[in-house]
Amino acid sequence: MVSQSFNQNIRETISLAEKFGLLFQAGSCVSLVTPPEVKFMSRRAVSYREVYDTIVSFQSFNLMLEDRSFFQFTEVEANSDVRLVYYPNPYQFVEYLSERREILKLLESEEITDIEYEQFTSEADFTSDIPVIRYDLSLNQHCKLYHPAAHFHIGFHAENRWPVDRVLTPKAFFLKTLYSYYQRKWKTQEQNTIDEIENVFDMLYREEIRKNCPLISEMSPKHFDRIEHERLHFR
């Protein structure tokens, strides 16, 4: 069952993005339920661009950033079954528009045909250097040898699981993504104090981790075993 605190955290995350000029579009302000059509079409997609386009066409996200990357936040059961995902925009619009203008000039000067123009534009491959980032929490699927209760998936490899000893909220995941992939935006919030440089985003991030993101090893020790502590993991 979805908790009120999870839905409230989503709304706070959307408000945070809007406050700092990062928000392009707000989607669902509660735990996201993915439409069956999106699941069906995404599973049959042959490229990431198809997955991205499908999700966008159904507006199946919680918030979209100015660069058209977006986030999905889903909770099935509080502190037990959570899915948080960041989807980068696979289209680099500046490069895309520039190349499309050049191709259009060739068409207008009759150096290429309509069919060749359509082929050039359809075959253009504009991808993002940032991978899809997914955080999964599933206590029921925990296996101390192979399947951490909480983990990051970086990219698309199914067995690529980076263990995490912490329950993450939408806001913590959002701020961690900003810290990792939006350094220019992140650094705009730096403030010089007498003794050191402080960052508003960093203060919010650390506060969120401290207050609302408990350690799994303390909350439910059996779901983060001793041997898992001995391996590399996020904490």
Image (cartoon, rainbow, N blue to C red):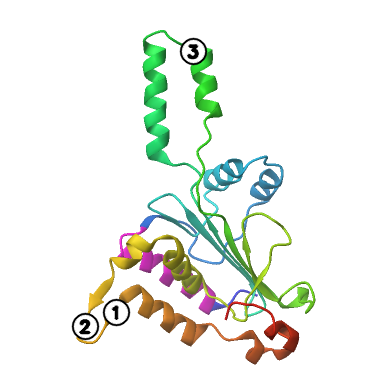
Kind of element beneath mark 3: helix
Whether label 2 touches label 1, CB < 8 Å: yes
Amino acid, disc 3: Asp
**Mark number displayed over residue 145:** none
Quarter-wise, where is residue 166 in the image?
bottom right
Question: Distance between the Cα atoms at labels 3 and 1?
Answer: 56 Å
| The C terminus: image quadrant | bottom right
Q: Position of residue 165 (x, y in %)?
A: 62, 81
Amino acid, disc 1: Glu
Foreground tag (3 vs 2)? 2
Residue plotted at (31% across, 65% down): 20
Foreground tag (3 vs 1)? 1
In the depicted structure, whether residue 56 falls above or below residue 197: above
Question: Distance between the Cα atoms at labels 3 and 2?
Answer: 60 Å
**Mark number displayed over residue 114:** 3
In the image shown, does 41 or 232 lie closer to the viewer? 232
